[in-house]
Each structure stands twice: as C-alpha cells, then as structure tokens.
C-alpha cells in the first residue's frame, strides 16, 4: 500500500499517493528548471556513459548558405555549392526555436502499485508534469500518449498552454480511471507502435513506464524511434520490485510488475525472485547503453523533487 507523507516534510506537492489531482500537476510549474540530482546523474553515467549528452539542450537546424567570410568554421563549408559556383560558401545553422516533445505515459495495471510513498502511476504523472513544464518553458510543442489498461489518449503536439493543459488533464483522468482487474486492451507495444506513427523526425521523446511489458518487439520499436529522435527512458520503480526483505515473506504476496513472480512462499522462491529481478534490470540497462538511449530510474518510494536538484531555479 502507498503511505502518504505530508508535503510540509517532503517539499513535494500534496498527494494522496493513490491518484492525482490537477493542482498537484500544476504545482510543478515552479520547478520547470530542475535537473537530476548529482546522485541520480552519477547512477545514470554508470548506465548510459557518454550517451547522457543526448538528452541535453536542443538541436541545430539549417538556416541558409552564404559566401565564406574570414573566421568562418571550415567544417561548415558547403562543398556542393562551392563546387557549383566556384566560390566558397558556408552553411549557417540556428538553434531550433520550437521542437516537438512527445511523452508516452504508462498507467496500466502494473503501475498501480506502491509500497512506501506513492503508486508508480502517480509518480509517472508527476514526472510527466515536470517534463511538460520544462517543455513549456523552452517554448516547445507538447504532445504524446497517455494510456491505462483499457483507454488511451493521443495528443498531437501543440504549443503554448493548450498542449500542456490537455496532457495534464488526460493524465489526471486516466490515472483516476484505473481499469485494475479488467481484461487488458491496451499494451506498451501497441502504444509504442502508435507513438512511432505520431512522432515527427527530430523530436524529443520521453517514455515513462515500469517496463514490465518490455519485450523484443518493444525494444525494436524503441530502437526505431531512437534513429531519428532523442529518446529518454524513465523507468518508474518500487524497492520491492528489485529486492524483497527477508521479513517480507508472505504466502499471498505478489508483485504484479515482474512477470512470473508468482506467490512467494519460502526463502528459495524469494532468492529466485530477487535474482530474476536483477537479471532483468541488467539486461534492460545493457540494451539501452548499447543503443545509445538515455535511461533513468525514478523511485516511487521517494518524492520526485528529492530525486532532482531542488536548488536549481
């Protein structure tokens, strides 16, 4: 179960821990300039190495070609135009002023779990809100997909407040309208496939999930997105998913976000569970590292703002 901690002690927006209210998501507006804490960055470097740079800043887009001038970077010479005209020409680039940002937010059944602070689904909405406000401050267009077990909301990228408010509103609705114990109609694979058709080349893509449904088909779609976009993986996790304390052995304990966990009845099963969780996590990290995809782990057991640099304003 999720245990609520008053905001006065956590420096985080008030939350029940089970679902989200719009005012919680709106409160992240004042934290739009936050970055990951040094501790979190260090952990990410161990996972993603030099690929961390892929999620920083924005790209440069071609502006025009003009005659070469003394002091121009020779690496920017347009050799095709130079050869055609007989005179040296230089390519000029400018910073992208408005970049599409897409968020894929998983609120399916495995996300409806939390052992200490909030459900993973709630933490996912909080993170999506923070990333949305960051996009708004950069004047980027925001769009994406929010889905739970049965429903999905697809939002095309829109600038100004319209896109942001639409995304926050859908996050609130689908987080509260959980379809727990209802046969699954939506899946991570289906939404990644939908996202691949929605995303525009050169976009920044944030995928927020616990990745309990991650399989080879999902990996292929993420790799495809990575070819022409900046892709960031935000893995929402709970401590019980990676390691069970010895005192937690219970006949009816089941962690729904790790496939095949089953019911844990003795110490041998518990060790097997811990080993399977560790192996699965290492495989995921190795894959994203290999393909140059930034990968962050966000815990549902700790207030989101504590995992970011709260001093950055």
Image: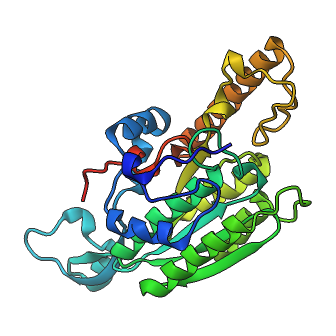
How far from the left and from the top, in percent, is residue 142? Answer: 50, 77
Which one is in front, 80 or 174?
174
Name the residue located 20 percent from the left edge and 77 percent from the top edge.
88
The picture quadrant where one finds residue 41 is top left
Name the residue located 43 percent from the left edge and 76 percent from the top edge.
99
Name the residue located 80 percent from the left edge and 60 percent from the top edge.
187
Q: Residue placed farthest to the top in the image?
A: 268
Q: Is residue 230 visible?
A: no
In the figure, is residue 163 to the left or right of 215? left
In the figure, is residue 119 to the left or right of 252? left
In the figure, is residue 297 to the left or right of 249? left
Q: Quadrant location of the C terminus?
A: bottom left
Which one is in front, 266 or 188?
266
Q: Quadrant location of the N terminus?
A: top right
The picture quadrant where one finds residue 246 is top right
Which one is in front, 284 or 39?
39
Up-down relation of residue 60 to residue 75 (above or below): below
């Amino acid at each position: 179960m999720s245990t609520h901690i008053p905001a006065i002690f956590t420096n985080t927006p008030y939350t029940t821990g089970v679902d989200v209210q719009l005012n919680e998501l709106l409160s992240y507006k004042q934290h739009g300039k936050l970055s990951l804490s040094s501790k979190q960055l260090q952990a990410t470097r161990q996972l993603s190495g030099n690929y961390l740079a892929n999620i920083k800043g924005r790209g440069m887009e071609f502006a025009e070609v003009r005659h070469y001038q003394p002091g121009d970077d020779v690496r920017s010479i347009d050799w095709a135009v130079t050869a055609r005209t007989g005179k040296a020409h230089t390519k000029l680039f400018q910073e992208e002023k408005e970049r599409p940002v897409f968020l894929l937010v998983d609120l399916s059944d495995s996300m409806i779990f939390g052992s200490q602070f909030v459900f993973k689904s709630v933490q996912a909405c909080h993170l999506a809100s923070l990333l949305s406000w960051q996009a708004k401050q950069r004047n980027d267009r925001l769009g994406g997909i929010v889905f739970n077990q049965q429903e999905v909301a697809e939002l095309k990228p829109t600038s100004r407040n319209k896109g942001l408010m639409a995304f926050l509103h859908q996050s609130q609705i689908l987080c509260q309208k959980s379809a727990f114990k209802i046969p699954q109609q939506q899946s991570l694979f289906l939404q990644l496939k939908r996202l691949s058709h929605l995303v525009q080349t050169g976009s920044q893509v944030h995928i927020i999930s616990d990745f309990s449904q991650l399989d080879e088909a999902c990996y292929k779609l993420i790799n495809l997105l990575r070819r022409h976009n900046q892709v960031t993986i935000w893995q929402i996790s709970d401590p019980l998913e990676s390691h069970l304390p010895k005192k937690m052995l219970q006949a009816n304990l089941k962690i729904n976000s790790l496939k095949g966990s089953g019911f844990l009845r003795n110490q041998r099963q518990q060790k097997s569970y811990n080993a399977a969780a560790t192996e699965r996590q290492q495989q995921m990290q190795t894959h994203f590292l290999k393909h140059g995809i930034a990968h962050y782990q966000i815990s549902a057991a700790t207030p989101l703002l504590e995992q970011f640099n709260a001093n950055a304003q």
